[in-house]
Amino acid sequence: MKNFIFSFLALLLPPTYMMGQAQAIKGKVVDSNGMGVPGAIISAPESRTSADADFDGNFTINAKVGETLKISMLGFDSVSVPATAGTMSITLKEAGDTALKEVVVIGYGTRKKVDNTTAISSIKAEEITKTKVINASQAIQGKAAGVQVISSDLPGSTPSVVIRGLGTALGGRNPLYIVDGMQTENINNINANDITSYEILKDASALAIYGTRAANGVIIITTKKGTGDKVSVEIESFGGVRQPLKKVKMAGSNKYAYYSNVALQSTTFSQDQPVNTDWFDEITRTGSYTQNNVSISGSSEHIKYFFSLGNYEEKAVLNGLDYGRTTFRNNNEYKISKKLTLNQTFSFTSANSSPKPLSAFTNAYKQSPIVPVYFPDGKYGVSRVGDNGFASETGSSFNNVGNPVAQLNFYDEQQKSVTLQGGLKLDYEILKGLKFTSQFNGEYYTWKQYNFNDTKNIWLAANPNKVDSDYAKEFPNANINLLTKGREDYFNWNLSNYLTYNKLFANIHDVEVTAGIETSVKGPRETLTIARKNVNPDSNYWALNDPNAGHGVEYARFCN
């Protein structure tokens, strides 16, 4: 009996063992019409083997029964199926329908990409997010043929985008930006993470509806909307550092003293200098930046919603040069009825910056290394040489270059701007193929700035051997300081109403007709600048309507 059981188990073991071994799996790959797909790639990741389908779509691959096979072919959607012992039949679905239905935004509507005959470059969200960018304009760089993007490392600066050459002397070269239907001057206020697509219109036929405003090209930007049937939360955070790629190698203080003495044919400077200042290092730091984004989106049968919040902070390489930007966006789509749809967009952007004079770099390379940043008594170093051949608070001046560190420390300016953009779009299907659209968009921008020029202390820093009374004697009628405050704001809006008729005849003739009117108003740009002299040095008491009558207004300018 034991021998019988052993023999029975021995008969069962070989099939079980064989199921775990690779064997020849045969099959055929066909399309949705049952035709063989030659060249289809069949891969078995677990067995690390692959095979190609022959001219009729037939294939043979060494794989395990039950192992997942992956079948792919250009122009078809890839599929994954389990391997079976018998002859397999695998059907691939053509992916061409999706490509043919892809659309691009053109002016007042969209057009199938396959039907488009004008010069339009389209950049989708997948391409935008491949590389992390600080400004929305930088997302175009290197991704659209014939479009040049020239970026600056200055925080908060607007990259230069050139589409149709350098433009004209009066018309400039900046393109026209259309953001969700709103015409705007730049897109610094947009978080690149909120963008779905860029459509770059280049030739005359594509630009015709915008007239002369589009002489330098048009960039149409569409921002994100809610998708899916569940609430989706996305969080993104990244950061980085900045350092100069290459620095100019400067001479040390002893070499400077030697060559200066040779040039002057004297022994003015000592050959054993106690100070060796690297002015470039004194005015720079390792720059850093961080970007944090969070978005919430979703949709239901009657509403699609998208909320996003982003914050960007940057400390530039130049000491004290900082920039920050906070963005908020809300896009909603309401399906009011079967024929009526309402779209609403709103964005808020607040930006803060503390500019610094870039001429400090020039002064850093010009200033002598024998000059200290500070003298032992705490006063700023100046380019004067004493009898001992060292830099001194007194003595003869040997150049007209100021202290770059003092230049940055005394430069006190702050800027703040707020940009509001929003709009409503109503779509109503009058008849099948005939749609009426009414869209209103508005933009409001406000900017504030102050600059405090500490005139007296700047003079004393450049003349450490002087005191307050010396300034009063030398400049009896001069300002002690000067506070400049400025503000600027403007409001733009546009309203468009149009009808769109679209019909496909005989499955080959796709006709689309658009007719409508548009009103666009670019409001006056109001600028006010007021300078007040001799204000309280404490910034908590700064005000243009200073109650102290002795503090006169130096000048006031108003532009409309």
Image (cartoon, rainbow, N blue to C red):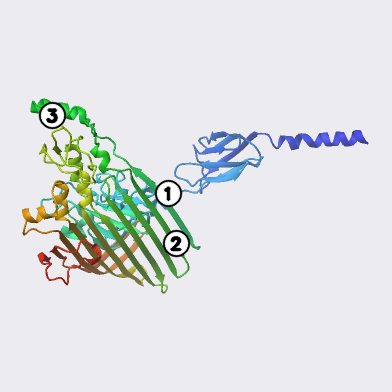
- Tell me residue 200's x, y (percent): 27, 52
Does the CB distance between marks 3 and 2 fall below 8 Å?
A: no
Query: Disc 1 designates what residue?
Result: 96
Up-down: is 148 above or below 324?
Answer: above
Q: Is residue 390 visible?
A: yes
Q: Residue at x 24, y 39 (%)?
A: 280
The mark that comes first in sequence, 3 or 1, is 1
Query: Disc 3 designates what residue?
Result: 260
Amino acid tagged 3: Ser
Amino acid tagged 1: Gly
Of badges 1 and 2, nearer the viewer stands 2
Q: CA distance from mark 3 to mark 1?
A: 75 Å
The mark that comes first in sequence, 3 or 2, is 3
Per the rendering, the mark at residue 296 is: 2
Q: In the rendered view of the protein, which quadrant contains the N terminus? A: top right
Instruction: Give the secondary structure at mark 2.
Output: strand
> In the figure, is residue 259 to the left or right of 230?
left
The mark that comes first in sequence, 1 or 2, is 1
Q: In the rendered view of the protein, which quadrant contains the C terminus? A: bottom left
Please state which of residues 208 and 557 is positioned toward the viewer in this rendering.
557
> In the figure, is residue 416 to the left or right of 329?
left
